Amino acid sequence: MPPLQKKPKRKTKSRPQATVKQRLAKQAAHKKKSAAARLKKNVKKRDTAKTKGKVGAQKRAQNRINKAAGKTGPGGKKHTRKTIKTANKKDKAWSSASSSAKKSGTTMSSLVKKRSGLKKGSAEYKKVQNQINKHYGVKKRHK
């Protein structure tokens, strides 16, 4: 048997290290690409909300689009909570659910507020969610 020999190391081409300028350029390109993807996602959300008649969701998505474009600020307009709330009143599903809730002695806003303070999946949460579904006319019931 011949004596053991070490394998010769393979010569690999070493890549030159990227300069700081190159790294910063790469980071900026990545940031720009991800911002474009977020903008596209928000535009899609806004458009689906518009087709479904969800005015509040549409306005919130528009706020995100405006923020990304740099249109908010001193001169830019922003949909405030008040404008979104008034727009939601025009939303047919919300208004019909609200009128249904008023007949039973509660309001949709109070039910949603109550639900947001509960742990998802708990018995109380399910009870409140069932009430909300009932007012919306959804047949889904949580057990």
Image (tube, rainbow, N blue to C red):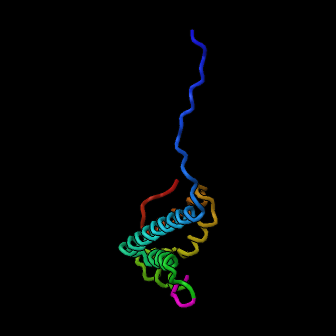
Q: Is residue 104 left or right of residue 46?
A: right
Which residue is most to the bottom? 75
Residue 130, compared with residue 94, is above or below; it is above
Total marks in image: 0
Q: Please state which of residues 101 and 78 is positioned toward the viewer in this rendering.
A: 78
Residue 103 seen in this snapshot:
no
Q: Please state which of residues 119 and 10 is positioned toward the viewer in this rendering.
A: 10
Residue 123 seen in this snapshot:
yes
Q: Position of residue 57 (x, y in %)?
A: 47, 74
Q: Quadrant of the N terminus?
A: top right
Secondary structure mainly formed by the magenta segment: loop
Q: Which residues are magenta?
A: 74-81
Residue in the picture at 59% in, 66% down = 115
Q: Position of residue 15 (x, y in %)?
A: 54, 49
Q: Position of residue 85 (x, y in %)?
A: 51, 82
Q: Please state which of residues 70 and 2 is positioned toward the viewer in this rendering.
A: 2
